[in-house]
Amino acid sequence: MSIRTIVAATDASIQDALKVRVEVFVEEQQISRELEFDGLDEECIHFVSYDGDQPIAAGRLRLIESTGKVQRICVLSSYRGKKIGNEIMYLIHKTAKEKGLDQLILHAQESAIPFYEKLGYKISSEIFFEAGIPHAEMKLKLN
């Protein structure tokens, strides 16, 4: 297994990230394509992890003034538990710091809250439902 994580800077690598999102969110979690593809992809920075040439994980960062919104973090089921999510998040954090952002926020699926807590995120809301799935807002101060 030769894993590499990159900022998706080409149309092909962005398409690879979108493929992973379809597999995880649309096919596995049964979220509608309309909800998954919210029209905001063009204004986001995309990230993708590969095993060789195979895209296996993805995420995006949306810049909102001095805050970054971490979104669409996903790892193919056969690669979960192998620290690939950590690699995506490391690169997102690095990129956010390079952009001078003060904080990151995200909507974590309830099952993923412990993952984000290990990265330093703190819960900042009650549980709410998004796409029929329980979530909590979480924040990470970068400074």
Image (spheres, rainbow, N blue to C red):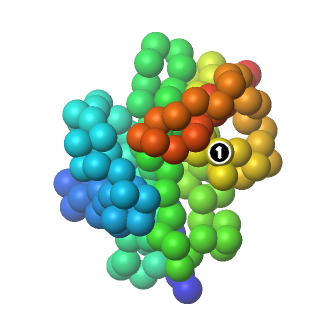
Q: Is residue 132 left or right of residue 109?
A: left
Q: Is residue 4 above or below residue 141?
A: below
Q: Residue furthest top?
A: 65
Q: Secondary structure at mark 1?
A: helix
- Considering depth in this image, is 9 or 30 the residue closer to the camera? 30
Q: Is residue 98 above or below residue 32?
A: above
Residue under the point 51% across and 27% down:
68
Q: Is residue 117 left or right of residue 51?
A: right
Report the residue marked by disc 1: 110
Q: Is residue 98 visible?
A: no
Q: Position of residue 132 (x, y in %)?
A: 46, 42
- Residue type, numbered disc 1: Glu
Q: Residue furthest front?
A: 132
Q: Quadrant of the N terminus?
A: bottom right
Q: Quadrant of residue 36?
A: top left
Residue under the point 34% across and 35% down:
44
Residue under the point 50% across and 50% down:
73
Residue under the point 70% across and 45% down:
113
Q: Residue furthest bottom?
A: 1
Q: Position of residue 15 (x, y in %)?
A: 24, 58
Q: Quadrant of the C terminus?
A: top right
Q: Position of residue 116 (x, y in %)?
A: 70, 45
Q: Position of residue 92 (x, y in %)?
A: 54, 43
